[in-house]
Amino acid sequence: MTLSREDGQLYYKLWLPMLDFVNRKYRINRKLKSVATAKELDPADVKKIANKLWSDVTIIDAYLIENPDLPDDHREIIRSWKRRIQGKFMMERHLKKGTIFISLEDEEVYQVSGIISSWEEMFLGAPMPLMLEATFMPFRDVIISDGLVMPYNILVGGGMKRMFKDVYMTAKKSGRIHQSL
Protein backbone atom coordinates (compact mmCIF):
# COMPACT_ATOMS: atom_id res chain seq x y z
CA MET A 1 0.00 0.00 0.00
CA THR A 2 1.06 3.56 -0.67
CA LEU A 3 -0.25 6.99 0.10
CA SER A 4 -2.66 8.41 -2.44
CA ARG A 5 -0.97 10.31 -5.25
CA GLU A 6 -2.08 13.60 -3.68
CA ASP A 7 -0.81 12.65 -0.21
CA GLY A 8 2.49 11.40 -1.65
CA GLN A 9 2.99 14.76 -3.35
CA LEU A 10 1.95 16.57 -0.17
CA TYR A 11 4.46 14.59 1.87
CA TYR A 12 7.35 15.70 -0.33
CA LYS A 13 5.96 19.26 -0.47
CA LEU A 14 6.21 19.35 3.35
CA TRP A 15 9.30 17.18 3.90
CA LEU A 16 11.80 18.64 1.42
CA PRO A 17 11.48 22.28 2.60
CA MET A 18 11.88 21.01 6.17
CA LEU A 19 15.18 19.38 5.17
CA ASP A 20 16.26 22.61 3.45
CA PHE A 21 15.50 24.52 6.66
CA VAL A 22 17.58 22.09 8.73
CA ASN A 23 20.45 22.19 6.25
CA ARG A 24 20.50 26.01 6.13
CA LYS A 25 20.13 26.48 9.88
CA TYR A 26 22.79 23.95 10.89
CA ARG A 27 25.05 24.16 7.80
CA ILE A 28 25.26 20.43 7.39
CA ASN A 29 26.06 20.39 3.68
CA ARG A 30 27.09 23.81 2.37
CA LYS A 31 27.37 22.50 -1.20
CA LEU A 32 23.72 21.45 -1.24
CA LYS A 33 21.75 24.62 -1.92
CA SER A 34 18.29 23.02 -1.98
CA VAL A 35 17.11 19.50 -1.31
CA ALA A 36 13.73 20.42 -2.77
CA THR A 37 15.07 21.51 -6.17
CA ALA A 38 18.26 19.44 -6.57
CA LYS A 39 18.49 17.46 -9.79
CA GLU A 40 20.46 14.67 -8.12
CA LEU A 41 20.74 13.87 -4.44
CA ASP A 42 23.15 11.61 -2.61
CA PRO A 43 20.99 9.73 -0.09
CA ALA A 44 23.90 9.81 2.40
CA ASP A 45 23.88 13.63 2.31
CA VAL A 46 20.13 13.77 2.84
CA LYS A 47 20.38 11.21 5.65
CA LYS A 48 22.85 13.46 7.53
CA ILE A 49 20.35 16.32 7.36
CA ALA A 50 17.46 14.11 8.48
CA ASN A 51 19.57 12.70 11.32
CA LYS A 52 20.08 16.23 12.64
CA LEU A 53 16.32 16.80 12.60
CA TRP A 54 15.55 13.50 14.31
CA SER A 55 18.23 14.10 16.95
CA ASP A 56 16.36 17.23 18.11
CA VAL A 57 12.69 17.35 17.17
CA THR A 58 12.36 20.84 18.67
CA ILE A 59 13.72 21.88 15.27
CA ILE A 60 10.20 21.14 14.03
CA ASP A 61 8.84 23.83 16.35
CA ALA A 62 11.44 26.31 15.06
CA TYR A 63 10.45 25.47 11.48
CA LEU A 64 6.77 26.05 12.24
CA ILE A 65 7.55 29.39 13.90
CA GLU A 66 9.49 30.50 10.81
CA ASN A 67 6.64 29.37 8.53
CA PRO A 68 3.49 30.84 10.09
CA ASP A 69 1.62 30.89 6.78
CA LEU A 70 1.46 27.11 6.44
CA PRO A 71 -2.15 25.87 6.44
CA ASP A 72 -3.29 24.36 9.74
CA ASP A 73 -3.61 20.83 8.32
CA HIS A 74 -0.03 21.00 7.00
CA ARG A 75 1.21 22.30 10.36
CA GLU A 76 -0.53 19.39 12.09
CA ILE A 77 1.10 16.83 9.79
CA ILE A 78 4.54 18.36 10.38
CA ARG A 79 3.96 18.62 14.14
CA SER A 80 2.99 14.92 14.21
CA TRP A 81 6.48 14.00 12.99
CA LYS A 82 7.75 14.64 16.50
CA ARG A 83 6.20 11.23 17.31
CA ARG A 84 8.58 9.46 14.94
CA ILE A 85 10.28 6.23 15.93
CA GLN A 86 13.75 5.17 14.86
CA GLY A 87 15.68 1.99 15.05
CA LYS A 88 16.44 -1.35 13.52
CA PHE A 89 13.50 -3.31 12.20
CA MET A 90 12.84 -6.60 10.51
CA MET A 91 10.64 -6.27 7.41
CA GLU A 92 8.61 -9.41 7.93
CA ARG A 93 5.92 -9.52 5.22
CA HIS A 94 3.95 -7.47 2.70
CA LEU A 95 0.18 -7.11 3.03
CA LYS A 96 -2.37 -5.23 0.93
CA LYS A 97 -2.70 -2.61 3.67
CA GLY A 98 1.05 -2.12 4.20
CA THR A 99 4.26 -3.88 5.09
CA ILE A 100 4.86 -5.42 8.51
CA PHE A 101 7.94 -4.33 10.45
CA ILE A 102 9.07 -5.71 13.79
CA SER A 103 11.26 -3.59 16.06
CA LEU A 104 14.44 -5.41 16.99
CA GLU A 105 14.53 -3.46 20.26
CA ASP A 106 11.13 -4.29 21.73
CA GLU A 107 9.34 -6.56 19.20
CA GLU A 108 6.61 -3.98 18.62
CA VAL A 109 4.90 -4.61 15.28
CA TYR A 110 4.15 -1.81 12.80
CA GLN A 111 2.17 -1.70 9.57
CA VAL A 112 3.90 0.83 7.32
CA SER A 113 2.73 2.28 4.01
CA GLY A 114 4.96 3.33 1.15
CA ILE A 115 4.96 6.96 0.05
CA ILE A 116 4.90 6.66 -3.74
CA SER A 117 6.14 3.07 -4.17
CA SER A 118 5.17 0.13 -2.00
CA TRP A 119 7.81 -1.50 0.17
CA GLU A 120 7.43 -4.61 -1.97
CA GLU A 121 8.31 -2.61 -5.10
CA MET A 122 11.25 -0.90 -3.39
CA PHE A 123 12.75 -4.19 -2.20
CA LEU A 124 11.62 -6.43 -5.04
CA GLY A 125 13.40 -9.76 -4.87
CA ALA A 126 15.02 -9.06 -1.49
CA PRO A 127 15.10 -12.10 0.79
CA MET A 128 12.56 -11.85 3.59
CA PRO A 129 12.68 -11.10 6.40
CA LEU A 130 14.97 -8.14 5.73
CA MET A 131 16.76 -6.20 8.46
CA LEU A 132 16.93 -2.45 8.03
CA GLU A 133 17.42 0.81 9.87
CA ALA A 134 14.58 3.27 9.44
CA THR A 135 12.67 6.21 10.82
CA PHE A 136 8.90 5.74 10.85
CA MET A 137 6.62 8.72 11.18
CA PRO A 138 2.92 9.47 11.15
CA PHE A 139 1.22 10.85 8.07
CA ARG A 140 -2.44 11.52 8.68
CA ASP A 141 -3.79 8.15 9.86
CA VAL A 142 -1.00 5.83 8.66
CA ILE A 143 2.69 5.21 9.29
CA ILE A 144 5.29 5.96 6.61
CA SER A 145 9.08 6.20 6.62
CA ASP A 146 11.13 9.31 5.97
CA GLY A 147 12.35 7.55 2.82
CA LEU A 148 15.92 7.22 4.09
CA VAL A 149 16.12 3.52 4.82
CA MET A 150 19.35 1.57 5.27
CA PRO A 151 19.00 -2.18 4.60
CA TYR A 152 21.50 -4.66 5.99
CA ASN A 153 22.89 -7.45 3.85
CA ILE A 154 22.20 -10.20 6.39
CA LEU A 155 20.64 -13.54 5.57
CA VAL A 156 18.16 -14.73 8.18
CA GLY A 157 17.96 -18.46 8.89
CA GLY A 158 14.85 -20.59 9.26
CA GLY A 159 14.72 -20.40 13.05
CA MET A 160 14.82 -16.61 13.03
CA LYS A 161 12.22 -16.46 10.25
CA ARG A 162 9.85 -18.57 12.37
CA MET A 163 10.52 -16.40 15.41
CA PHE A 164 9.58 -13.20 13.55
CA LYS A 165 6.54 -14.89 12.03
CA ASP A 166 5.45 -15.88 15.56
CA VAL A 167 5.92 -12.31 16.80
CA TYR A 168 3.73 -11.07 13.94
CA MET A 169 1.04 -13.73 14.46
CA THR A 170 0.89 -13.04 18.21
CA ALA A 171 0.54 -9.30 17.58
CA LYS A 172 -2.14 -9.93 14.96
CA LYS A 173 -4.18 -12.20 17.23
CA SER A 174 -3.99 -9.74 20.12
CA GLY A 175 -4.70 -6.63 18.00
CA ARG A 176 -1.29 -5.11 18.76
CA ILE A 177 -0.19 -4.08 15.27
CA HIS A 178 0.49 -0.35 15.25
CA GLN A 179 -1.19 1.24 12.24
CA SER A 180 -0.64 4.84 13.35
CA LEU A 181 1.70 6.72 15.68
Image: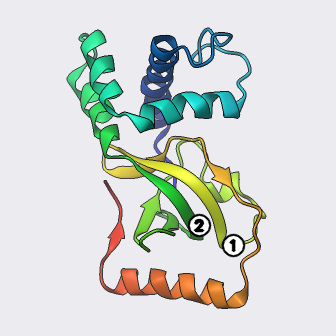
Q: Secondary structure at mark 1?
A: loop
- Determine which quarter of the picture holds residue 169: bottom left
Residue depicted at x 70% and y 24%: 41
Amino acid type of disc 1?
Answer: Met
Question: Which x, y percent locates residue 24?
Answer: 50, 11
**Residue 97 or residue 25, whichever sits in front:** 25
Q: Residue furthest left?
A: 72
Mark 1 is surrounded, within 10 Å at the Cα level, by few (under 14), some (14 to 19) or many (20 or more) other residues, namely some
Find out whether the residues at labels 1 and 2 contact each other: C-beta distance under 8 Å: yes
Q: Is residue 67 shown to the viewer in this render?
A: no
Q: Which residue is mark 1?
A: 128
Q: Of residues 27 and 98, which is closer to you in this image?
A: 27
Question: Can you identify the residue that label 2 sits on?
Answer: 91
Lower sequence index among marks 1 and 2: 2
Residue 21 occupies which quadrant of the picture?
top left
Element class at badge 2? strand
Q: Residue at x 56, y 87 (%)?
A: 163
- The residue nearer to you, when weighing 38 against 43, is 43
